[in-house]
């Protein structure tokens, strides 16, 4: 059943269009895929002339909350995961996104926008793994 | 100029993540919890983003230089292989456990979330582990898949 108290169709759609506009700008202006895991991963594999745009993009992400606060009060997030779970999750996300060449932005948004079968396969895979994981944590373990 | 536009893009991307609600891990887990009280918001974020992205890539794929005059680094890989699937599985499990993927985690660090700090330190360690393993097995992998196919610009 649908969780109507938390479902935010309009702000999520609007935010999605803003994300898609950012993706469009990076593709057209910089000729790059806005895949966050790939952009961070490239910093860990330094190449001459390839660092400035990556660091600038990451810096943009970091200052987004401060910029947002100039216009509206951000909603407080709820983070249920404990510190040990966050450590395990971070390791899996870091290694997995690099091994699988992309995350929710690189494969999910950019790949699906490009109609890439490879990114569609990746997106289905991580979505299914996410569904199974949350099912196990929420409905089997407790 | 590339760095200036990348900064603007990062700022816009991060703002979009905040507006969409995706910087809140409980909304991610709410989407992944199809057997519980299901929050479909994430599908609307993807829908909006893919709509805008689809139009942009139709133009981008025809170009040989970017609007800023640089090269186009768009992926050409099409093969579905074991790293893609195994990597996706590992990522999906981590995503479901924490409710964070890389973009929202970085934005949450900017918002001063201490739990995002822990997640990101582990995430970067995971990426570094991959880099070390990749260097170790690099020669063997290259014989199977040409490098330019397996790792176009390092993304997707």
Image (cartoon, rainbow, N blue to C red):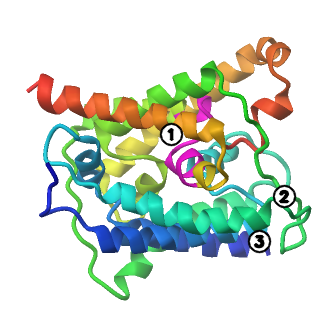
Among the 4 quarters of the image, the one containing residue B75:
top right
Report helix, strand or loop for mark 3.
Answer: helix
Query: Chain ID for label 1?
Result: A
The residues tagged by marks 1 and 2 sit, at their Cα atoms, a distance apart of 24 Å
B148 or A122: nearer the viewer: A122
Judging by the rendered image, the residue that carries numbered circle 2 is B72
Q: Is residue A121 left or right of residue B120?
A: right
Q: Residue at x 41, y 75 (%)?
A: A14
Q: Is residue B27 left or right of residue A54?
A: left
The mark lying in front, picked from 1 and 2, is 1
Same chain under badges 1 and 2? The reply is no
Up-down relation of residue B60 to residue A130 (above or below): below
The secondary structure that dominates the magenta segment is: helix
Same chain under badges 1 and 3? The reply is yes
Judging by the rendered image, the residue that carries numbered circle 3 is A29
Up-down relation of residue B109 to residue A103 (above or below): below
Please report the bounds of the magenta region as a residue range. Answer: A97-109
Report helix, strand or loop for mark 2.
Answer: loop
Judging by the rendered image, the residue that carries numbered circle 1 is A123
The residues tagged by marks 1 and 3 sit, at their Cα atoms, a distance apart of 26 Å
Q: Residue at x 51, y 35 (%)?
A: A94
Q: Is residue A3 magenta?
A: no
Report helix, strand or loop for mark 1.
Answer: helix
Q: Earlier in the sequence, mark 1 or mark 3?
A: 3
Up-down relation of residue A15 to residue B64 (above or below): below
Query: Chain ID for label 2?
Result: B
């Amino acid at each position: 059943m649908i969780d109507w108290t938390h479902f935010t169709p309009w702000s999520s759609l609007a935010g999605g269009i803003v994300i898609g506009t950012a993706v469009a700008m990076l593709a057209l202006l910089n000729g790059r895929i806005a895949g966050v895991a790939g952009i961070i991963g490239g910093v860990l594999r330094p190449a001459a002339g390839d660092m400035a745009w990556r660091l600038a993009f990451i810096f943009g992400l970091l200052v987004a909350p401060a910029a947002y606060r100039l216009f509206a009060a951000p909603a407080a997030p709820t983070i249920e995961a404990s510190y040990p779970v966050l450590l395990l999750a971070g390791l899996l996300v870091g290694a997995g996104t690099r091994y699988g060449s992309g995350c929710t932005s690189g494969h999910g948004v950019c790949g699906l926008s490009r109609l890439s079968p490879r990114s569609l396969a990746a997106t289905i895979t991580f979505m299914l793994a996410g569904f199974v994981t949350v099912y196990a944590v929420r409905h089997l373990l407790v | 100029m590339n760095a200036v536009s990348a900064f603007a893009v990062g700022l816009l991307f991060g703002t979009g993540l905040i507006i969409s609600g995706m910087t809140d891990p409980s909304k991610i887990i709410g989407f992944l919890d199809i057997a519980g009280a299901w929050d479909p918001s994430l599908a609307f974020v993807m829908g909006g983003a893919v709509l805008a992205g689809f139009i942009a890539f139709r133009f981008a794929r025809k170009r040989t230089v970017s609007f800023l005059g640089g090269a186009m680094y768009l992926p050409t890989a099409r093969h579905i292989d074991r790293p893609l699937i195994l990597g996706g599985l590992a990522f999906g499990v981590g995503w479901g456990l924490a409710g964070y993927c890389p973009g929202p985690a970085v934005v949450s660090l900017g918002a001063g979330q201490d739990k995002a700090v822990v997640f990101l330190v582990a995430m970067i360690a995971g990426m570094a582990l991959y880099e070390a393993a990749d260097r170790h097995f690099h020669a063997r992998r290259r014989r199977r898949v040409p490098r330019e196919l397996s790792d176009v610009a390092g993304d997707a």
